[in-house]
Amino acid sequence: MALPPPDPQFVLRGTSAAVHTLHFSCGGPEPDIPLLFSGSENGFIHVWNLKTHRVDTALDGHGRKSICHVETMGGKDRLLSQGRDQRICLWDLAEGRTSVTDSVFTEHVGFCRCSLLKVAQGRWLMAVAARSLEEVQILELPSKTSVCTLKPEVGAKLGMPMCLKLWQLSCGSQPVLLAGYEDGSVVLWNVSMGKVLSRLTCHQEPVMSLDFDSEKAKGISGSSEKVLSIWSLNEQQNLQVYKTHELVNAGISDITIRPDKKIVATAGWDHRIRIFGWKKLKPLAVLDYHTATVHCVSFSDHSNPRDRLLAAGSKDQRISVWSIYAQT
Amino acid sequence: VCFIPGGLDCSISFVSHVLGKVCVHGRQKEILGVLVPRLTNLTKSDCIWRRICWRLVECVPDRWMEAVVLGFVQKAPGADVLSRLLGNLVVKNKKAQFVVTQKILLLQYGHTTAVLQNLLGYLSLDGLRRTLLHKVLQELLETWSSSSAVKHSSAEQQLYISKAILLCLSHLKEPEIESCRQDLLTSMMEGMKCHLDSNLPQLRRLGMVVAESISLKINTEGPVLKFEYEEDDETRELKSLLVQTPSFCVVPSLPDDDRSEKAGAALPLVPESDEKCRTAAPVMPDEESDAELDSDDDLIPYDMSEDKELKIKAPVYIRDCIEVLSGSRSEDVDKWEATVKALESLVRKNPAATREVSVELAKILLHLEEKTCIEGFVELRQRAQVAVLTTDPIPVAKYLTSQFYSLNYSLRQRMDILDVLVLAAQELSCPKFHGKIKHSGAQKPCIQLLPGSDSSKDWRRIVDERIKSKTRRFDMGQPRVELASRPNEFNCVAGYFFFPLIQHFDRPLTTFDLLGEDHLVLGRLVHTLAILMYLAVNTVAVTAMGKALLEFVWALRFHTDSYVRQGLLSCISSLLLSVPMEQILADMTEELLETQSWLGDVMEKDPDGDCRRLALQNLLLMENLKKKLEAVPS
């Protein structure tokens, strides 16, 4: 007899706008407070205190334009935020400061979230959609120098890049980029040479979100249709479709794999969060709390497995936080 | 008939005379049936025989030349044979030239496609004759693109000319097309305009096929004109003519499947996935991962039975529907969609509530535009309108008929009003029909032409069947199943539907002139009135309606558009079927006699085949009704 799905552990209210992006920062040792960063449509980044469930700070750096991505860079004191004012801001939040230390003007007017990858101590690579419609630019941070521009060949007709994921197999190896495009294909790019390694058409509609498990060389992508596509990367660096899963309702905004690679969470347009087992994509739970499209899901990085949380931000302006499958 | 072979110099003018005389007396088939095969064989390789043959036809006196040439053209099994037999007769002989280039092509239209192929192929096979081919093409195009020709000539003649044009095009070579490209383009544009303006779908299709073919020929690279229309045998046959058939083939080649498929799609198909992309079959999971399976089973799924498809609830009350549709909260498009889909059934289930807001609802529906892409939006809207109209006929009919003649409505909206009135009238008068009639309101994208009178074709069939049932009553042996009778709900409201429509037809508005450019709407209006008349059988207002209709028909009887005339004749049929004959004879005797003489006129002289047929049916109907009346002892 299956249990009914759990209720959220708590719900954060107070953003007064649709929530587009979430990021946990709970890895610090005690007495550090676990934090949740959220970016909203009204241009504010809220820093939530997960002990008091209240907003500690509200950051306003994007001219009230919607925030599409927030991510910490090595600790909760440095934050990167991407907004629809075509800027990426780097924040210094140490010791209660809330200042923008640097910003990158991307000239990108779309919704593609940037992707960060730490390549060395204090050095990151960032993949961001560029000004020209089909291109992705790789920048090095904090120097903001351009490493290369990934331009699809003429006639490829990929459309806009919709989602990006930079990764490397192990520290020191070649960084690679997985990009999902408007035409429904996922492309694997070799960043240093700027070449396409493999291209896989796995959707009929634009790829809305993707995530990749570099250990198992398996990735998952969702689009505006009813199908989730799981693909794998073989030794020749070729992408192949591994499996597809059909959903009850169409539309996925976000997919994320838990850091322990056991479960995957998807944020759906049908207001529901779905949890699957990562190994065989076995459906595990459907969390039905929100009353509007769920825009983002994020897993926490707690060092103690039992404290692990899942957060989901929705158009109904609430952030639901769940504790699910935390015992494994 | 046998000829003396050898090098004898003989005069065959005597034979030509005989041939000519026989042909002119109408015996072409017999004599040429023997002559042509023999000559075909003889002239196959022998030059002398060819010269003899040419001499033979050249010596035929002018007064008999036409019959001979016509006979040869009809009898020859192919263009090359014709070429061998006739040689350059058309160049040398003026009469033959006239027959071939003018008479057969432009003045007659009863010949088969094979004859056309022979003729035009013959013209194309020799350099001297090719100039004639160009001249012919020019003249054909002139006729094709002249609007008066399109309006006044019959459909058969237009088909014939179109075939001839396509055959000429198929024979033209590249350099020749280059030289007359500009003229081709001009004629194509002109002709396309006249053809698309016509109300008859067959003519429109003809125009589209020919224009497409011309465009194909003159734009060998680059985008080609493509229309979207329904393929049928006629269009397929026409398109097959454009392909050069080998000269020994007489029968038109089988429809070229590639072409008809290509022409059917107006937009190029989206290319399937690139060859470079991989869409390999899913990789089966490895067998070795058995050991890993266990750890996955640790995660116990929760109950997911609540996970169903998300359904947006439509409003349950009519007033809520009105609020959603009138766009006060425009962001909620899901709700709008759900409302549009649910509206018809809501209206039918809540007649009392609908009656309170009927005119407002009708207004909203008339102006409702497609906000999101719903399948079958036009049909949904129409059904909702019909539901509203049948629930509260009088006020809504008053509203709709007044709007028909108001400013600032599109033609599409006005025709929608007519369609809705007809469907509602149909439903009110025979409720059992509801649901059986197909709605053909779906509009297609791309070059959009107003859909033809499909609904009136169904009605024409029904009316025709009624006429048939009345004119051949003595034939019907089987007993008819008695249909359950219900009171005709259309009775009380027929007048409200009918009279306002007929009132203002001659008053032009700034944007709407029934008697002028908007003859398509006039045609539809006339057909609508015919149907309303037909449905008003056994109602109280039928006599008054009949009288008004007769006056209306009389005013418009000489309209130039054949679609309008067909409508007028259907009006007469409906009138004769619906108004009891006693009433007609009592009130409208003079008009009836005048109508009868007009019908006789139409039957003999009208260029359109359908009009003639309808006029004949009307006359027969009149006769039968009169007889029936006289047979009944009063």
Image (cartoon, coloured by chain):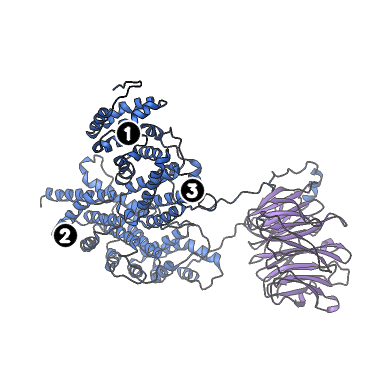
Q: Is residue A313 above or below residue B142?
A: below
Considering the numbered disc 2 on the image, is that residue within a helix, a strand or a loop? helix
In contact (CB < 8 Å): disc 3 and disc 1: no
Identify the residue under disc 3: B263
Note the chain letter of the blue one: B
Callout 3 crowding tier (Cα within 10 Å): few <14, some 14–19, many ≥20 = many
SS of the residue under disc 3: helix
* Depicted A44 relative to depicted B177: above or below: below
Give the chain of mark 1.
Answer: B
Crowding at dot 1, Cα within 10 Å, few <14 / some 14-19 / many 20+, comes out as many
At label 1, the amino acid type is: Phe
Circles 2 and 3 on the same chain:
yes
Q: Mark 1 highlights which residue?
A: B72
Task: Pick whichever of labels 1 and 2 is earlier in the sequence.
Answer: 1
In the picture, residue B192 is in which quadrant?
bottom left
Q: Which residue is mark 2?
A: B591
Chain holding disc 2: B
As measured in the structure, the alpha-carbon distance from the residue carrying label 3 to the one carrying label 1 is 36 Å
The purple chain is: A
Among the two numbered marks 3 and 1 on one chain, the one whose residue lies closer to the N terminus: 1
Q: Does the rendering let one see residue B162?
A: no
